[in-house]
Amino acid sequence: MSPLSALALMALTGVCSCQTSDCSYLDLLTYLNLTTTNGAAVNMRPVKNWTTPTLVQVDMVPFGILQVDEKTQTFTSHIWINMHWNNEFLTWNASDFCGIDTLMVPRSSLWIPDVFIVEDVSDSGTIQHSPLVSLSPEGSLLAITRQRLTATCLLVVTLFPFDQQRCNFTFSSMNKASIMLGPINNETALTRTSEEFMVTQGEWELDKMEIFEYRNNISRYPDRLIYTVTISRRPLLYVVIFILPLLFFVWLDVASFFISEARGEKLSFKVTVLLSISVLLLILKDMMPSTENHLPMIAIYCVGIFALVGLSVLEAMLLSFLHDLDGYCKARSPDNSEEKIQLEEDFYKAEEAPENGPVPPDRPEGHDLLKLILKEVKTTRQEVGGPNKDEMRPGRYRRLADIIDRVFFSLYLLTAVVFLTYMYTAWISQII
Ligand SMILES: *[C@@H]1O[C@H](CO)[C@@H](O)[C@H](O)[C@H]1NC(C)=O
Ligand SMILES: *[C@@H]1O[C@H](CO)[C@@H](O)[C@H](O)[C@H]1NC(C)=O
Ligand SMILES: *[C@@H]1O[C@H](CO)[C@@H](O)[C@H](O)[C@H]1NC(C)=O
Ligand SMILES: *[C@@H]1O[C@H](CO)[C@@H](O)[C@H](O)[C@H]1NC(C)=O
Ligand SMILES: *[C@@H]1O[C@H](CO)[C@@H](O)[C@H](O)[C@H]1NC(C)=O
Ligand SMILES: *[C@@H]1O[C@H](CO)[C@@H](O)[C@H](O)[C@H]1NC(C)=O
């Protein structure tokens, strides 16, 4: 080989090494031995000394509250999970690779910590891992997962619809003692991020997020990282469709005491009110879990009002019965009042008969006046005679009914006021 050609070759290799001088991602990937899937690298925890635990930092950011199901006690949300850990073998000097400071590496060629959420009951299809993991020169990795998370959550609906729920999301690992868990950001920053990115909340509002860390180096249990998400319900709709209508029903029922008993409409009106309340009760039953130990206040409210109206229906029935009894006694009483009435009606007919026919033109004006006076006298006589008749036996039931009605009405009003005040203090004032 001539010196010239040797020089040319050297120059060529120099140029070549310069051109391929580690400026592409592929070179870095080759340098890191990640071009072929290395089974050992995927399966083994990437630490140089096995006693070194791997610190896995996890951030959970909810960006949508999809559903809170009181019946099945689940909380469905849309979350991001950022997971951060270190790989001691995947390091490089950025200045050797034209300053590449981030490399996206396929998830499948790396060891990924097995961190899971204990409360998770969602289908496997709801998890969406980002296919690439970002790697920085110090070997720190960041994996992002998006998930439609359905988690079990103990929902306490005692104060429904003014309730506030606290749901725990416990991150844990199946690897004992080799993985330490911790958060990336603090809770203030997380809550702010979450509020910023929140796309849908439905009837709920995210109040705050808290982070609890349970370090466990006794190696019996793995570490736990608990995110406690506090959400509160927006109660306006329930106030409008439940609480106010029920209040109106009580008022209607109170007002129905002033409907006259004689027409028999009082009872049917009260029964209609009772039916309307039972419709609301049915709707409520569909919403509330039946496994609840503490009865929800709204159920007590509904049932209390139902009982009040039910009692007033019973009272109306009793009154109606007494009135009927009264009428029955009157009909059976040895009194000639019916005969008298019959006689009077006959008299009336006889008097009024000429008016049905064509009025004679020569009729004197005084005749009409006389008839009017006669009518007046008759009505006064009836009015004077009325009370006398009522003082006799048959009127007793009617008077009894009146007394019962008055006493019951006072008691009813008192009970309703006491009950509503109690509900207000025990239920609504707890929140305000
Ligand atoms: C890649 O593998 C070669 C040989 O298998 C080894 O010498 C080298 O240190 C490895 N590089 C890295 C970054 O692990
Ligand atoms: C591995 O770590 C243990 C405890 O930290 C230490 O005692 C030991 O010397 C380390 N081994 C090596 C080879 O660095
Ligand atoms: C990276 O390489 C440059 C020069 O090649 C050197 O000066 C620097 O100290 C290296 N950095 C690290 C962290 O090794
Ligand atoms: C949620 O986590 C907190 C903090 O560890 C704990 O006090 C609380 O009891 C947990 N709640 C439930 C329902 O497990
Ligand atoms: C939380 O982190 C932010 C920056 O991310 C910092 O400004 C704030 O002081 C931290 N708050 C607490 C309570 O540590
Ligand atoms: C366990 O944790 C405690 C503090 O929480 C620490 O003092 C102790 O050294 C730890 N033990 C081991 C074996 O890491």
Image: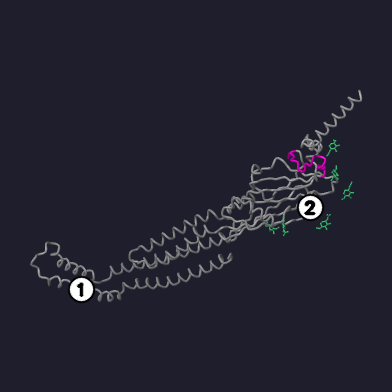
- Inspect the image, locate mark 1, and give the three-letter code of the amino acid beneath it: Glu
Indicate the secondary structure of the residue bearing disc 1. helix
Which residue corresponds to the image point at 31% horizontal and 69% vertical from the top-left?
A: 329
Which residue corresponds to the image point at 10% horizontal and 70% vertical from the top-left?
A: 364
- Inspect the image, locate mark 2, and give the three-letter code of the amino acid beneath it: Arg
**Residue 112 located left or right of residue 154:** right
Dot 2 or dot 1: first in sequence order is 2
Which label belongs to residue 282?
Answer: none
Indicate the secondary structure of the residue bearing disc 2. loop
Q: Is residue 24 above or below residue 427?
A: above
Q: Residues within 10 Å of mark 2 (few under 14, many from 20)?
A: few
Q: Residues within 10 Å of mark 1 (few under 14, many from 20)?
A: few
* Distance between mark 2 and mark 1 Cα atoms: 103 Å
Choose top left, top right, bottom left or bottom right for residue 43: top right
Q: Residue 158 or 325: which is nearer the viewer?
A: 158
**Mark 1 CB in 8 Å range of ligand 4?**
no
**Residue 112 located left or right of residue 357:** right
Q: Are marks 2 and 1 in contact (CB under 8 Å)?
A: no
**Residue 356 located left or right of residue 165:** left
Which label belongs to residue 220?
Answer: 2
Which residue corresponds to the image point at 53% horizontal and 68% vertical from the top-left?
A: 422
Choose top left, top right, bottom left or bottom right for residue 112: top right
Q: Residue 247 or 227: which is nearer the viewer?
A: 227
In magenta, the rendered stretch is 88-108
Q: Residue furthest left?
A: 362
Which label belongs to residue 376?
Answer: 1
